[in-house]
Image (tube, rainbow, N blue to C red):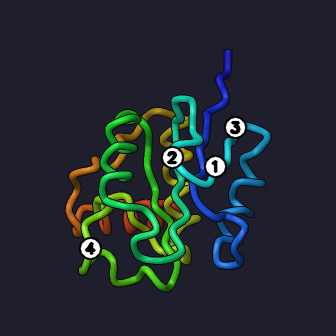
Amino acid sequence: MFVRPHILVVGEIARAEFAAVREWLLQVQRDSQTTRVSSFANADSEPDLVIICQSWPDEFSASEATIALGRWPLSLWVVCYGAWCASDGRTRTVWPLSVRVSVDESCSRLNHLWRILREQREAPLPLTASRDESLEFDVIWRANQCC
């Protein structure tokens, strides 16, 4: 029996900068169950995939992120960040580097994670992955999709 993956979306996904994420969710909506909340406090179930829509630095505190990552340690994570957050990976440590992806690159990462969820043949990127490992994870995925 096919179980539809549960996707939890946290943040202000209605903002214009997250149009690509909204479009991706529309593509997978038939095969998934999606819950949208504005904050972690409003989430009440165990998600398979957590999508964070981050519009500005410090939108989510380090303690919120730590609690959420600890609350759902087996979930796949992606933090889709907007233009105002581009330097956060260098100047802040709220989210692990392995889960951060610019909104412009988000669909590629989401497609990769969706495939991992659906096929369960590939290992996800660990939360402790370095910047180089994260880049390799995405580059190899894109290269394999082109062939």
Q: Is tag 1's residue or tag 3's residue first in the polypeptide sequence?
A: 3
Location of mark 3 (residue): 32
Q: Distance between the residues labelled 3 and 4?
A: 32 Å
Q: Nearer the viewer, residue 138 or 13?
A: 13
Q: How far apart are marks 2 and 4 (CA)?
A: 20 Å
Q: Which amino acid does label 4 sit on?
A: Arg
Location of mark 2 (residue): 40
Q: Is tag 3's residue or tag 2's residue first in the polypeptide sequence?
A: 3
Is the C-beta separation of discs 2 and 1 under 8 Å? yes
67 vs 22, left or right, is left
Residue drawn at x 30%, y 63% is 94
Q: Which amino acid does label 2 sit on?
A: Phe
Q: Is tag 4's residue or tag 1's residue first in the polypeptide sequence?
A: 1
Q: For label 2, count other residues whose C-alpha is less than 10 Å away and answer few (under 14), some (14-19) or many (20+).
A: some
Residue drawn at x 55%, y 64% is 53
Q: How far apart are marks 3 and 2 (CA)?
A: 20 Å
Q: For label 3, count other residues whose C-alpha is less than 10 Å away and answer few (under 14), some (14-19) or many (20+).
A: some
- Nearer to us: label 3 or label 4: 4
Q: Distance between the residues labelled 1 and 3?
A: 16 Å
Q: What residue type is labelled 1?
A: Val
Q: Is tag 3's residue or tag 4's residue first in the polypeptide sequence?
A: 3
Location of mark 1 (residue): 37
Give the structural element (helix, strand or loop) at label 3: loop
Give the structural element (helix, strand or loop) at label 4: loop
Q: Position of residue 30 (x, y in %)?
A: 79, 40
Q: Distance between the residues labelled 4 and 1?
A: 24 Å
Residue drawn at x 60%, y 51% is 9
